[in-house]
Image (cartoon, rainbow, N blue to C red):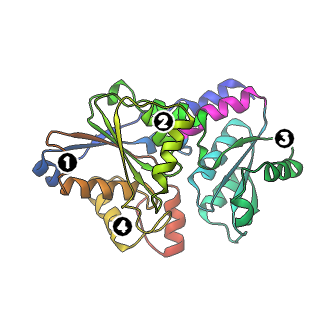
């Protein structure tokens, strides 16, 4: 595998930062812009591009020809790893949580079309996927491989997500992102400026996310220069859960700004931001930068499953 093939994926496309124009923002004296990370690459888009970048470089350095990773049936991570593996000439194995179902949904159909081998694992074993026993069993079945954790969160992923913020983002007072496994949030914490505040919107139900983020900051020795706050009241029932209010909001947002949002992550984050603006959470004069972390590939499967027509 030649390195120039790797660079073909790892050079990001031009990323647009789009400022929104809406009466509520003018009324509250707030500016709100969106950094379109969903445009960073047509397949491995959003935060997944940055999470995978150094993992792929490391896999190549170790001369690993096979990538193995984990995810649910609609996983953005599975989709991105499959696309990256095909582009770069890796073989790929996706360990999918739960039972096999046919026909495949759009996410898994795409992954398989990229050459990813799908391996289904019952939920009890999946909960122990990081145990040595499970990894050894997978090695016995598939041979040598490079493991990329579920969601892509590890030290190399954090190294990549640190690069989302740069000199061009230093003028913003607040940076916002959705939170899943917490890797993107941790990387951003390691790169925010002293005057900035990072706001995380958890897509998962429960208070455990506060401990998870604290553990990540401790584990990877991250001492942020700026402040941060996590909101866990905009989860709409939990990971992958939604309701009509969120669906209507996503449709409204697209009609206003022509920016698609997904129902798992970015839709919940933008809903939360708008609620906080209405509640006067932000001081007058604040300029927010919301990170659009992608996830749009999952909309097709959601529309297929529920008969909706969310914009892609």
Residue at horizontal 42 percent and vertical 29 percent from the top: 191
Give the position of the N terminus as an image quadrant: top right
Q: CA distance from mark 1 to mark 4?
A: 21 Å
Provide the residue designation for mark 2. Answer: 187
> In the figure, 305 relative to 158: above or below?
below
The tag earlier along the polypeptide, 1 or 4, is 1
In the depicted view, which residue is nearer to us: 86 or 129? 129
Q: CA distance from mark 1 to mark 3?
A: 52 Å
The tag earlier along the polypeptide, 2 or 3, is 3
Q: CA distance from mark 2 to mark 3?
A: 29 Å
Q: Which residues are magenta?
A: 49-63
Q: Name the mark on residue 246.
A: 4
289 to the left or right of 99: left
Task: Confirm whether the magenta stretch covers residue 39.
Answer: no
The tag earlier along the polypeptide, 1 or 3, is 1
Provide the residue designation for mark 3. Answer: 144
Q: Which one is in front in this view, the residue at disc 1 or the one at disc 3?
A: 3
- Residue 132 on image: x %, y %: 79, 48
Residue at horizontal 71 percent and vertical 60 percent from the top: 126
In the depicted view, which residue is nearer to us: 41 or 28? 28
Provide the residue designation for mark 1. Answer: 21
The tag earlier along the polypeptide, 3 or 4, is 3
Q: CA distance from mark 3 to mark 4?
A: 43 Å
- Residue 148 on image: x %, y %: 67, 43
Whether residue 46 appears in this view of the structure is no
């Amino acid at each position: 595998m030649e390195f120039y093939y790797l660079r073909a994926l790892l050079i990001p496309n031009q990323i647009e930062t789009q400022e929104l124009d809406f009466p509520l923002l003018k009324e509250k004296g707030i500016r709100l812009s969106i950094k379109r990370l969903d445009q960073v690459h047509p397949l491995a888009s959003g935060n997944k591009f940055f999470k995978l970048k150094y993992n792929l470089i490391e896999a190549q350095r170790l001369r690993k020809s096979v990538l193995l990773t984990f995810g649910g049936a609609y996983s953005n991570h599975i989709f991105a790893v499959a696309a990256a593996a095909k582009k770069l000439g890796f073989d790929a194995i996706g360990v999918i949580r739960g039972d096999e179902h046919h026909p495949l949904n759009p996410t898994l159909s795409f992954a398989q079309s990229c050459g990813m081998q799908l391996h289904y694992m019952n939920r009890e074993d999946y909960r122990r996927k990081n145990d040595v026993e499970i990894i050894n069993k997978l090695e016995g079945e598939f041979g040598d491989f490079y493991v990329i954790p579920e969601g892509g969160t590890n030290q190399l992923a954090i190294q990549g997500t640190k690069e989302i913020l740069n000199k061009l983002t230093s003028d913003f007072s607040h940076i916002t992102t959705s939170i899943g496994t917490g890797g993107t949030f941790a990387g951003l914490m390691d790169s925010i400026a002293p005057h900035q505040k990072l706001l995380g919107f958890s897509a998962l139900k429960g208070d455990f996310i506060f401990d998870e983020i604290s553990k990540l900051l401790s584990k990877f020795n991250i001492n942020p220069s700026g402040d941060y706050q996590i909101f866990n009241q905009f989860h709409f029932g939990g990971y992958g859960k939604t309701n009509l209010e969120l669906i209507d909001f996503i449709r409204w947002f697209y009609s206003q700004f022509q920016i698609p949002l997904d129902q798992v992550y970015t839709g919940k984050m933008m809903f939360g931001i708008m609620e906080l603006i209405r509640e006067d959470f932000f001081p007058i004069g604040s300029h927010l930068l919301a990170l659009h972390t992608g996830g749009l590939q999952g909309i097709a499967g959601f529309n297929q499953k529920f008969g909706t027509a969310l914009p892609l």
